[in-house]
Amino acid sequence: MQMEKEMKGLLVVVMVSLLCVFGISKECTNIPTQLSSHSFRYELLSSQNETWKEEVFEHYHLTPTDDSAWASLLPRKTLREEDEYSWEMMYRNLESPLKSSGNFLSEMSLHNVRLDPGSIHWQTQHTNLEYLLMLNVDKLVWSFRKTAGLPTPGKAYGGWEAPDSELRGHFVGHYLSASAQMWASTHNETLKKKMSAVVSALSACQMKMGTGYLSAFPSELFDRFEAIKPVWAPYYTIHKILAGLLDQYTLADNSQALKMVKWMVDYFYNRVRNVITNYSVERHYLSLNEETGGRSKAFGAGSPV
């Protein structure tokens, strides 16, 4: 009896030891890498050290057709199969609240809401309005004009909008959304003229290139994306521009912005179709390793039109 207890105890110790060894030696793929840091990625892409770049990007992509790679990931399925549908429906409702059925929530138009001028909320809104009015049209669209081959008066903004940043242009998308929402909330005519001037300037860039493409960086970044080569986040940036233009249409009734969105969507639809046609659908899925969210959001932004 005593021997049996000792054997069982030994077996437990061995099993625990094996689990510990497995846990220690197993790499957790959910831990963010250095590339998750925007500052690190900017420093890396700006560097002339090609050896450093090769070392960092060596294990950059995970091939979705590689069963062993997928099998080594931490559990991908935490829901019971019968719960998946309801979870997906809830997620879709959160993503698109206006499409939800029922009368649980009803959205109030920003045009019909005004804040009390004596409240801290109004003060905060006014501060945001002053900031939006400070921004310069020529600086906002500088890199777009450069990409389109148009004259570039003034200087570009720095930071994310710097001419050497692979994310340049996405702040402009944020500006288009923010200004459209602010105008709907205040009907400030000075802001209306400024944001309309930005849309017109961007339209001129799109017309100059003549393909529907519109971005602050050249389409070469998408060539790299489709070739499964390191690139920052071109579709993330395009989504911000698409979303901003859509906000200009839905909140400020700018029909020019809607035409631009449709032309952009046609351009990127054809890019994806060409990848699948000229290579394979597997090549398309490979590229999604870089920007699963950016790609789906970009085409989601264009879906209403």
Image: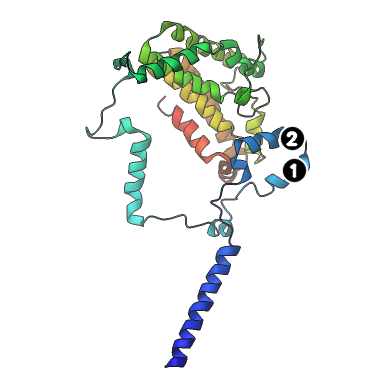
Disc 2 marks a residue whose amino acid type is Ser
Q: Disc 2 marks which residue?
A: 47
- Asked which quadrant contains residue 115, the reply is top left
Report crowding for label 1: few under 14, some 14 to 19, many 20 or more residues within 10 A (C-alpha).
few
Q: Position of residue 293 (x, y in %)?
A: 50, 38
Ranked by sequence position, the earlier of labels 1 and 2 is 2
**Along the horizontal axis of the image, is 229 left or right of 73?**
right
Q: Vertical placement of 297 versus 251: above or below? A: below
In the rendering, which numbered label is found on residue 52?
1
Position in image of residue 174 (x %, y %)? 50, 23
Q: Determine the secondary structure under disc 2.
A: loop
Picture residue at 44% right of the left edge, 32% below the top = 300
Snapshot quadrant of residue 90: top left
Describe residue 164's horizontal placement relative to residue 297 as left or right.
Answer: right
Residue ID at (64%, 27%): 219
Mark 1 touches mark 2? (CB < 8 Å)? yes
Q: Is residue 216 left or right of residue 122?
A: right
Residue 249 visible in this rendered orientation of the protein: no
Residue 237 location (% of width, % of height): 55, 29
Q: Secondary structure at mark 1?
A: helix
For the C terminus, which image quadrant? Answer: top left
Residue 223 in view of the camera: yes
* Residue 246: image location, x then y, percent: 44, 21
**Disc assigned to residue 7:** none
